[in-house]
Amino acid sequence: MRLATAVLLSTLAVSAVAQHPRDGEIHDSDTKAWWHTTEALSGDSMEGRDTGSPAYLRAAEYVVERFGAAGLKPAGDGGTWFQTVPMHEWSIPPASAKFSVVPDSGPPLRLGFLQEITLTPNDNPLYGTTDITQNGKPVGRLTFRGYCGKDAMADVELKIVLCFGTQRAGLPSGGERAANAKAGGALGVVNIDDPYFTIEPPRWPYAYARSVVLWPDLSGGRVRIPPGSRAPHPMLPAMRLSAEAFTRILAGTGHDAASILKTGGAKQPLESFDLPARLDVSFQITERDISSPNVLGMLRGTDPALAPEVVVASAHLDGYGFGTPVAGDALYNGALDDAAYVALLIQMADDIKAGKLPAPRRSILFAAFTGEEKGLLGSNWFVQNPTVPAARLAADINLDQLRPLFPLNILTVEALSDTTLGATAQTVATPMHIELRRDAEPERGLLRRADQFPFLRIHVPAISFIFGYDPGTDAERRYREWYQVRYHRPQDDLTQPMNFDAAAKFDTFFYNLVEAVANGPARPDFLPGSPFAAK
């Protein structure tokens, strides 16, 4: 699977980091070295490291070179550095996608694909256009059904159901809405953005419409429908609509979009109504088998009694690659999400080799996972097919969702109260004057959106961190702005605002935590009452 020699990779790395325009902002050599590695992994030459792409493989080879130089040993398949993750991909070429609201009278309203509406392609789409009839009934008529609970799904056969928001606690999930609509014979579901869900604002444009699954997921009876054939009432893939586009659709219908959005944002009852229009949808789906490797390196523990136990230090190597341009930039570099934290794994390995950090008593598995942005694919594959016996996995400390944009005084901790790792982290944080807090916004689902979650699902203690803030502060403003402007966008690049002192403080916290877990006398364990503890 190697695509380049170490010499070529070294040349690539040097060219990527030959100039360090931000060195003047950084006050210590360890943080400079970490940022230089971040530059190498998220510079334009790495092309955003999209899962399954040649650029991702270049980045993986770079990580292999650095892991090897730091004295790690291969811990992937068959004694190699790589654990191959087989996948299947569906994607929609943007030029093939056409979405139009066709009113009963008046001109059609064209919706911008990836700008106002998107959808998640899958293995059972309705191919072609919805501009047809079945059994004499028109297909694709639009109907608004509030939050799309079961009780709202009467008389939706062959219609496309508009549903308000999915993120707020207590509302039907996307999966529940789709099931309710399918039971009513609906043709599709369109989830409308909640513009009042400001803790994580709706993000447009989307880079692309692409779904990737672990290839074995296609076994067990799932059947692909070939192009041109149809099930009796096939469901369109799940769609998502911007609040602005919803407002355009309702214009002139007698329904007040602004009032509906405000009422939905307050979780108040919403009326149901049919619209005098249909949604005309046309797109093509391409599919292919791909693979992309996890990069796994092992540092053997020094204590013969504890070395069989393995602490996983993880981050994800993949990004988005090229996608829809934003402000003229189409390359989604993924600097903080998550190149910087693969770089931190490399820096920790370098520091242990150099004697700047103590050698661990337990073994440490350095894991750069693939496919996180496509649904935690690499970490899920690893826990299903561990390259070390699962019983030996003592803990996972995951690096993701970290934004060093303001001074580090607070860390939000995912799974803080689930395992003894929370108390260990508190012991490390207290002398560093870092306050640890539970997630104050659980409706965002951040615990389940990063690579620590598959470990918790197999009953391995795991923990992760987010830079925290007090409400109404400048820190919160910077945090929210990052999600509005940079999250999964080309603007997550090497030029973005950074607080390198905060980054250095977190790096030290991470080093100390890994040391405490790897060298502590007791293996991490679950606390009573955790839903992730083995029954």
Image (spheres, rainbow, N blue to C red):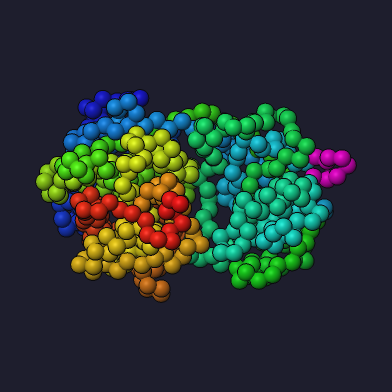
Quadrant containing the N terminus in the rendered view? top left
Q: Which residues are magenta?
A: 132-141
Q: Find residue 149 and report its horizontal and vertical position in percent.
A: 69, 59
Q: Find residue 421 and report its horizontal and vertical position in percent.
A: 31, 57
For the view shown, which residue lies furthest in the right direction?
136
Q: Find residue 344 and report its horizontal and vertical position in percent.
A: 26, 48
All told, the count of numbered labels is 0
**346 vs 106, nearest the viewer:** 346
Q: Is residue 6 above or below residue 311?
A: above
For the view shown, which residue lies furthest in the left direction?
355
For the view shown, which residue lies furthest in the bottom direction?
472
Q: Find residue 172 and report its horizontal and vertical position in percent.
A: 63, 59
Left or right position of 205 against 30: right
Magenta stretch: residue 501 in it?
A: no
Residue 21 seen by the camera: no
Q: Is residue 528 above or below residue 341?
A: below
Left or right position of 156 against 358: right
Q: Residue at x 28, y 46 (%)?
A: 311
**399 vs 63, nearest the viewer:** 399
Q: Residue at x 87, y 40 (%)?
A: 135
Residue 436 seen by the camera: yes
**43 vs 237, nearest the viewer:** 237
Q: Is residue 363 above or below residue 3?
A: below
Q: Residue at x 81, y 54 (%)?
A: 155
Q: Residue at x 51, y 28 (%)?
A: 289
Left or right position of 290 against 365: right
